[in-house]
């Protein structure tokens, strides 16, 4: 099975982060949440080594056969060894099962210690995870977009999702039942620093068997609530969803309120990795809903303002649609960019169009050196749709189901001779008075 892994280059020291409250900033709830629940997305419990790291990592917990196992980022043979299948035995009673839609209350206080730093090293993960762990097995009968949320924790825990199986062994002569955990590859993992929860996904998983490890540092056991949600790409057997497939779905309700957006799912990344600000996830005033919040901060450089990329994967044929609820207060503005090519370091990006919500109910699209005007409602939720049809070579913007504009799919911002593709959408709060909210976002293939 081909697995796409995203490199995460994370620092090994905590970065203290603070923002002074602007006297003109009236978003007091947002500020309070920001102050009370900051997250450093570059200091999680587990990470991928950076590409520049050629230093040797060595297991320190010395389990059998692992004491001398090394990782070198420039050693392709060793990489192949580390990424090979890995198996170990556990008591059968230590393995729990879960399924789509399940909510499970658990605790690491009675967990095993079968997953360790040496285990993760075999899969090119560097961690601080030598504590107790819980092991879950799950099976998907068909491809699905899966979200795993970990809530109600009191310690900073981590989740690592593997492709793998658990095979039950016969009961031995002493009456003890054991199982063999067989791990093939890492599908996804968390890197939050929050003591109050963690999130994997939404992540696409082919049909098959998977193993989830919930782990933590030594001596930091915690109770937790684990929830698994699935959107079947071929239609839920019990709830058919039609012929299309949902590639990304974000209601933000399973995200950690108060935390940075890009630290909570692989498909969200900051446009500039070193930018000081990120979008946040906040609760509504009635605490019944969560949404992504983007806001410009006075006194902060433009390059450090919230500017976040939604990665869609490279799409060059077929029909797709981005749909999201968007709220912009009167006098505030927002900006959505269509990114045809998104490069590390932004050295060779190709921008397809820029959509500006200017703050007075009027908007403009800049594409092919042209300006296309449209109108939108203010201070209320509106549904924004961006449809892409590579067959007919068209983009279309709609608001609340009403077509507002269309343009050729191969157009760039300043040219009519761009490529016919998309890799990302860009959500920006870089202009003065920029402030907006996103909810119920999806990216679908029709």
Image (spheres, grey):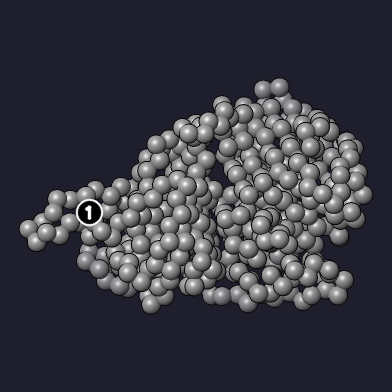
Q: Which residue is mark 1?
A: 179
Given the current orientation, which residue lies at the most extreme top position? 392
In front of the other: 242 or 68? 242
With respect to residue 422, does 288 lie above or below?
A: below
Q: Quadrant of the N terminus?
A: top left
Question: Going by the image, does 399 lie left or right of 43?
Answer: right
Rendered location of residue 433, percent (x, y): 86, 60
> Residue 364's quadrant in the figure?
top right
Q: Secondary structure at mark 1?
A: strand
Q: Is residue 123 visible?
A: no
Rendered location of residue 234, percent (x, y): 50, 31
Given the current orientation, which residue lies at the most extreme left position? 173
> Residue 89's quadrant in the figure?
bottom left
**Crowding near the residue tagged with mark 1, few <14, some 14–19, many ≥20 C-alpha atoms within 10 Å:** some
Q: Is residue 200 visible?
A: yes
In front of the other: 3 or 381? 381
Question: Going by the image, does 111 lie left or right of 206?
Answer: left
Q: Quadrant of the C terminus?
A: top right
Q: Residue at x 56, y 52 (%)?
A: 266
With respect to residue 189, does 244 lie above or below?
A: above
Q: Residue at x 88, y 38 (%)?
A: 374
In front of the other: 55 or 408? 408
Rendered location of residue 346, percent (x, y): 67, 51
Q: Residue at x 48, y 39 (%)?
A: 144
Q: Residue at x 91, y 44 (%)?
A: 362
Rendered location of residue 167, percent (x, y): 24, 48
Counting the numbered discs, the total is 1
Question: Going by the image, does 44 lie left or right of 63?
Answer: right
């Amino acid at each position: 099975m081909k697995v796409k892994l995203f490199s995460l280059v994370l620092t090994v020291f905590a970065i203290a982060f603070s923002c002074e409250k602007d006297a003109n900033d009236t978003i007091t709830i947002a500020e309070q949440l920001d102050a009370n629940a900051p997250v450093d997305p570059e200091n999680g419990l587990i990470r991928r080594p950076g590409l520049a790291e050629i230093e040797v990592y060595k297991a320190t917990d010395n389990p059998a056969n692992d004491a001398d196992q090394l990782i070198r980022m420039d050693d392709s043979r060793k990489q192949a060894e580390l990424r090979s299948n890995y198996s170990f035995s556990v008591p059968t009673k230590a393995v729990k099962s879960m399924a789509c839609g399940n909510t499970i209350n658990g605790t690491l206080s009675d967990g095993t210690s079968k997953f360790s730093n040496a285990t993760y090293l075999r899969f090119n993960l560097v961690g601080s995870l030598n504590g107790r762990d819980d092991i879950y097995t799950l099976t998907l009968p068909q491809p699905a977009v899966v979200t795993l949320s970990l809530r109600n924790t009191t310690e900073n825990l981590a989740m690592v999702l593997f492709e793998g199986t658990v095979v039950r062994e016969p009961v031995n002569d002493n009456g003890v039942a054991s199982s063999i955990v067989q791990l093939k590859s890492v599908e996804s993992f968390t890197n939050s620093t929050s003591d109050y929860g963690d999130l994997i996904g939404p992540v696409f998983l082919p049909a098959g068997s998977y193993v989830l490890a919930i782990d933590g540092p030594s001596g930091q056991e915690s109770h937790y609530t684990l929830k698994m949600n699935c959107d079947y790409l071929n239609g839920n057997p019990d709830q058919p969803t039609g012929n299309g497939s949902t590639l990304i779905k974000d209601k933000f309700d399973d995200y950690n309120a108060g935390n940075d957006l890009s630290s909570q799912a692989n498909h969200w990344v900051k446009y500039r990795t070193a930018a000081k600000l990120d979008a946040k996830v906040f609760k509504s005033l009635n605490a019944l809903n969560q949404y992504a919040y983007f806001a410009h901060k006075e006194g902060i450089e433009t390059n450090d303002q919230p500017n976040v990329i939604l990665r869609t994967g490279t799409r060059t044929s077929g029909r797709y649609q981005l749909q999201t609820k968007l709220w912009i207060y009167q006098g505030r503005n927002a900006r959505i960019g269509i990114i045809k090519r998104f490069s590390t370091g932004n050295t060779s990006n190709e921008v397809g169009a820029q959509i500006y919500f200017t703050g007075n109910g009027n908007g403009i699209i800049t594409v092919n050196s042209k300006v296309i005007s449209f109108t939108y409602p203010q201070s209320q939720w509106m549904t924004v749709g961006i449809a892409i049809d590579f067959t007919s070579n068209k983009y279309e913007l709609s608001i609340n189901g009403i077509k507002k504009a269309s343009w050729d799919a191969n157009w760039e911002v300043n040219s009519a001779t761009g490529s016919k593709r998309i890799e990302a959408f860009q959500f920006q709060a870089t202009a003065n008075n920029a402030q907006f909210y996103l909810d119920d976002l999806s990216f679908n293939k029709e």
